[in-house]
Amino acid sequence: MISELKLNNFRCFETSTINLSPGINFFYGPNGSGKTSILEAIYMCSSGKSFKSSNIKSLISFDQDFFSINAYDSNKGYTLNLVKGRASPISIKINNTKSTTSALLKEFPATAIHNNTFSFANASPDFRRKILDRSLFVSSPNFSETWFGFYRSLKQRNSSLKKGLIDNIDVWNQKVSEEGIALDINRITFFEDSLSELNNIFNRLKPSPMVDKLNKVNIEFFSGWDKENQLYELLTQNQKKDLFSKTTTTGPHKADIKILINGMDAKQILSRGEQKILSILWCCSQNEVLRKKYNIDATLIIDDIKSELDNATFEVFLNLLNFLDNQVIFSCIDDHFSSKINPNYKDFKKFHVEQLR
């Protein structure tokens, strides 16, 4: 986890040094003060990307030629240096050695919940898969090979379908099936571990009508095909349909985490605030798996925590902070949070953003 962050020419920050707590970090200030920019910079240390803008060049301060982010992990003794110029690609160095974005996720794992992705229940299946897969990329040394192997074979099968090349389609049916089953096993194992940790979290939360309601949510993993049939058999059976649609219609690339209440899609029942707090709880459960099973400290980033949350759902969040062991970094416009601070919160640290510029 990041213990020190240094920003240079990053959005509204000309230069700033921030010493983070290994526990709970709270940033507050008015709109435009730079709260989201700090969280954005922390997330970049994990991904090389912004959760707010697809154009990294736009993160460079006005009238400047580059930005740099320097981070330090005191637990590992690792240093990180990110530099992006207006006319040059992003440069990544870990311990002064040139590195890649994939290495960032492994060394500085983090998940971000922000206004565009606050609800997993309302998100796309692709987004929910990515949240699960990100944790697997961090925890499993072989998952990257499994994941890329499957998607390479899937790409080849889809290419054959688009070109109408059926002579070699069975070869790709076998490859997609073998590699897809390996991918599926990885996902199911981590999902079941996360679900177990989510139940543990519910058991530790202070009882309330809101906690009772959230605990009734049924979260299920769908592999992407009907398990009553072998994946290879389905791929073979669906060849005509896939040739017509020119794409593979069944398999792990269609996997999803289904969030249900009484068999109905939870997004039709839960309020936006309830969806957001459930997303936070699910991310915490995945981070707990990383911490307990793999000894990996992952960071949870939450931009604008009070957005969408009413008093009941906000109380669940405050309750959650009582027993979290991972680093949590969140922001809010005002400092009303201070009156609700529990003196037992682990390593709580508060930042007035306007004083950091």
Image (cartoon, grey):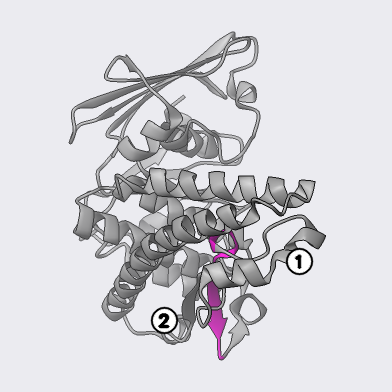
Point out which mark residue 124 bears. none
Give, as a single range, the part of the protein colored magenta: 252-262
141 in magenta: no
The answer to which of marks 2 and 1 sits earlier in the sequence is 2
Question: Do we see residue 92 in this rendering?
Answer: yes
* Marks 2, 1: nearer the viewer: 1
Where residue 240 is drawn, which disc sits there? Answer: 1
Is residue 327 or residue 193 the one in the foreground? 193
Q: Check disc 2 and give the amino acid type.
A: Val
Looking at the picture, tell me which residue is in the foreground, 354 or 194.
194
**Residue displayed at 58% across by 53% down:** 172
Check disc 1: other Cα within 10 Å, few if <14, some if 14-19, many if 20+.
few
Give the residue at mark 2. 211
50 over 111 or under it: above or below:
above
Query: Does the image show residue 333?
Result: no
168 relative position to 186: left or right: right
**Helix, strand or loop at disc 1?**
helix
Rendering coords of residue 114 (x, y %): 55, 51
Q: Which class describes the residues within 10 Å of circle 2: few (<14), some (14-19), or many (20+)?
A: some
Q: Residue at x 40, y 43 (%)?
A: 145
